[in-house]
Amino acid sequence: MKDLWVEKYRPKTLDGYVFVDSHMKDQVASWIKSGTIPHLMFHGGPGTGKTTLARMLINELGVDDYDVMTANGSKEARKVEWIDKLISFCQTMPYGSFKVVLIDEADYMNPVSVQPALRNLMEEYSQSVRFILTCNYPNKILPPIHSRCQTLQIAKADHTEFTARVATVLVTEGVEFDLDTLDSYVKATYPDLRKCLNLVQQNSQGGSLRKPSDGDGAVGDWRLDAVDLFKAGKIKEARTLICSQAAAEDMDGMYRWMYDNLDIWGKTPEQQDEAIVIIRKGLVNVPLVADQEINLSATLVELTQIA
């Protein structure tokens, strides 16, 4: 594991980045051609390429390293003291045409202190500083910041494209794999490409991609084991595993995972439509029930009865 595959295969140019939306690619290309960008906000699910797109833009625009400030909204940029450091950065003249402030996980910035201050700075230093915000939940960012940014939603790749990207990395690295094993990793992590690449790298040290169920030290995720149990027809065991491992505070993510992998519950469009209704019902019940495990278990029972 000399190099992290996530970083090694992170695209740095416009041609290397895979756009789901051709209109978005045209928009990004126009910014690169003009040599400048507005304030930007990229939002979408984890691992869908928000930070990669931001870094690619900075690279393609030729922004000097000294003109780039990066911060994390869930860490240093969450504290109001960080604003003083940001002001000092904005006040100095850029080496190039403009400076860039890249804030990852901007939806975790304090909405009472940091976000209002940021709103004013974005306006005050708009001639020499551009802000790029990435977030999972844009509704947690104040409307005045939204109004100062051009917003792009980074859509997830479909299962086929997602699988192809991971397979390309494995082939490039000379790792042998079978499609069924790769499919298990994809189902466990989709649409988080970053997580999938990390898991397959951890489990490819012997020159081949190990199955999640291998007992020879394979690094796993409980979702991997659950997918393998479903594939083996061990429905009750899979349901028990999911209910024992899913955290109460991550129920929204759990239902999202079930929705992102509809082919686990049914192969036909009609079966998958039925699964969506069941998942919706379970999700609606999340804030209403006292015991989340029972609600999740009941949802899984209904889903596994579809086929």
Image (cartoon, rainbow, N blue to C red):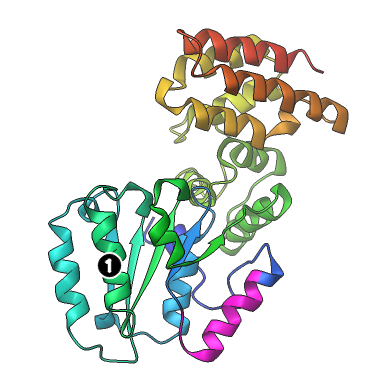
Residue in the picture at 22% in, 77% down: 90
Percent of width and height locating residue 135: 43, 53
Question: Can residue 42 be seen from the camera position used here?
Answer: yes
Tag 1: amino acid: Asn
Q: Is residue 150 above or below residue 45?
A: below
| Nearer to us in this view, 155 or 289 | 289
Q: Is residue 199 magenta?
A: no
- Name the secondary structure under disc 1: helix
Question: For the magenta stretch, what is the residue range?
Answer: 24-37
x 47%, y 22%: residue: 246
Report whether 297 appears left or right of 230: left
Question: What residue is drawn where x is 64% and y is 15%?
Answer: 299
Q: Position of residue 88 (x, y in %)?
A: 14, 74
The relative height of residue 190 versus residue 22 in the rendered view (above or below) is above
How far across and how far down the image is residue 12, in percent? 49, 75
Where 227 falls versus 101 (above or below)? Answer: above
Residue 269 rendering spot, x and y as whole percentages:
86, 33
Secondary structure predominantly adopted by residues drawn in magenta: helix
**In the rendered image, which residue does mark 1 sit on?**
120
Q: Is residue 36 magenta?
A: yes
> Badge 1, how many Cα within 10 Å: few under 14, some, many 20+?
few
Q: Is residue 288 above or below residue 185?
A: above
Can residue 214 be seen by looking at this rendering? Answer: no
The answer to which quarter of the image holds residue 261 is top right
Q: Quadrant of the C terminus?
A: top right
Residue pictured at 70% horizontal, 47% vertical: 159
